[in-house]
Amino acid sequence: QVQFVESGGGLVQPGGSLRLSCAASGSIESIYAMGWFRQAPGKEREFVASISRTGIITYYADPVKGRFTIDSDNAHNTVYLQMNNLKPEDTAVYYCAAGQTTAQGLSNYGAIKYWGRGTLVTVSS
């Protein structure tokens, strides 16, 4: 089993920035990629970004390309999501996720083996 500790969510004005973190523990060796999904009120959970275990390969959903950056600190089994130029439509609960697949493969909801509990991001003036 793998457990996550997520942090960094909060309230931010449009155009602002937030940095989410997700620290993994447990059977880390079973993880091939980690990433983030989000779920807005009344909507389905959707893929945001992912990164390979090596930290070399990243993959992004189109709505966040150029604004969000995913990176990792393998020494501390932690993945980060730097979110810039935030928009009201980015408001959602953000979930850390991991699976035994590639970074691109992790964009498939069905490939997720482990989920975090989520952290709320609210973008509002």
Image (tube, rainbow, N blue to C red):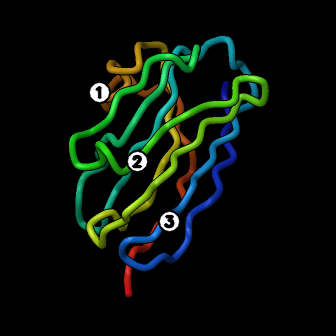
Furthest toward the bottom, the residue is 125
The residue type indicated by label 1 comes to Asn
Which of the marked residues, 1 or 2, is nearer the chain's N terminus? 2
Q: What residue is disc 1 on?
A: 108
Q: Is residue 62 above or below residue 11?
A: above
Considering depth in this image, is 104 or 46 the residue closer to the camera?
104
**Direction from residue 71 to residue 5 in the image, left or right:** right
**Disc 2 versus disc 3: nearer the observer:** 2
Displayed quadrant of residue 30: top right
Residue 34: image x %, image y %?
52, 28
Residue 50: image x %, image y %?
43, 30
Quadrant, the C terminus: bottom left
What secondary structure is marked by label 2? strand
Which of the marked residues, 2 or 3, is nearer the chain's N terminus? 2
Query: Residue, x 50% and y 20% (percent of image)?
Result: 33
Displayed quadrant of residue 79: top right
Which of the marked residues, 3 or 1, is nearer the chain's N terminus? 1
Packing grade of label 2 (10 A; few <14, some 14-19, many >=20) is many
The residue type indicated by label 2 comes to Phe
Residue 68's label in the rendered image is 2
Packing grade of label 3 (10 A; few <14, some 14-19, many >=20) is some
Tag 1–tag 2 contact (CB < 8 Å): no
Considering depth in this image, is 70 or 108 the residue closer to the camera?
70
**Direction from residue 75 to residue 48 in the image, left or right:** left
Query: Residue, x 29% and y 27% (percent of image)?
Result: 108
Query: Residue, x 48% and y 48% (percent of image)?
Result: 95
Quadrant, the N terminus: top right
What secondary structure is marked by label 3? strand
Residue 120's label in the rendered image is 3
Cα distance, mark 2 to mark 3? 16 Å
**Disc 1 versus disc 2: nearer the observer:** 2
**Direction from residue 7 to residue 86 in the image, left or right:** left
